[in-house]
Image (cartoon, rainbow, N blue to C red):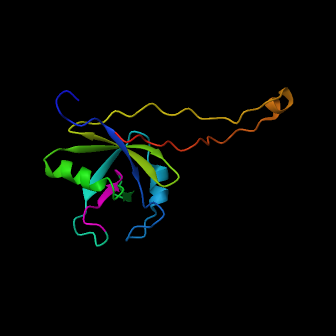
Amino acid sequence: MPDGTPPDFTLPVVGAPYNNKDGSDRRFEILLCVRGEALELRPEPRNKHDEHAVGVWSVRGVQIGYLPSQRAPYVKSLMRAGHELFGLFQEPTSFGAAVRIGVDRVPTLPPERPKQRAAVDDEYNQDRAEDDGGYYADYIPPDD
């Protein structure tokens, strides 16, 4: 960016298979999240597994997971430098979710990926093709 602010970036939210300490289900909370919904990023310096841990919380105050340990130190360094980080729910994924992060501004979400349908190669099957239920392959975010 011309002003030196990092561009918006997408990170995975991991740890969804684990329940929270209060017993709430992270995967269920992810199902309640809506594209574009605000997410809170909370550093956890006393986390016994990773001093750089950054938790990701929904607007309902339920933790949905963590930023990956490989990227959390970078995110924490931005926070320590006085930047305000804004997170938006981008989409659910097989491993949890994807969060779009903006530095000192609300991020812009990338366009939604179109739903993919199975190829149907003849007229008979084309008329009988079943709905794919909205399944599409997981998006792999680029390393910005």
Residue sitting nearer the eye, 131 or 95: 95
SS assignment for the magenta stretch, majority = loop
What residue lies at 43% left-to-right and 40% top-to-bottom?
Answer: 35
**Residue lying furthest left:** 82
What residue lies at 19% left-to-right and 48% top-to-bottom?
Answer: 78
Figure disc tally: 0
Where in the figure is residue 3, as x and y percent of width and height?
16, 29
Q: As drawn, is 55 to the left or to the right of 30? A: left
What residue lies at 45% left-to-right and 66% top-to-bottom?
Answer: 18
What residue lies at 39% left-to-right and 59% top-to-bottom?
Answer: 65
Kindly indicate the quadrant of the structure image that contains residue 24. bottom left
Where in the figure is residue 139, as x and y percent of width and height?
50, 42
Q: Quadrant of the C terminus?
A: top left
Where in the figure is residue 125, as x and y percent of width and height?
83, 33
Q: Quadrant of the N terminus?
A: top left
Q: Which residues are magenta?
A: 50-59
**8 lies above or below 49:** above
Residue sitting nearer the eye, 2 or 13: 2
**61 lies above or below 100:** below
Magenta stretch contains residue 110:
no
Where in the figure is residue 6, as x and y percent of width and height?
24, 37
**Residue lying furthest right:** 124
Q: As drawn, is 99 to the left or to the right of 139? A: left
Kindly indicate the quadrant of the structure image that contains residue 123. top right
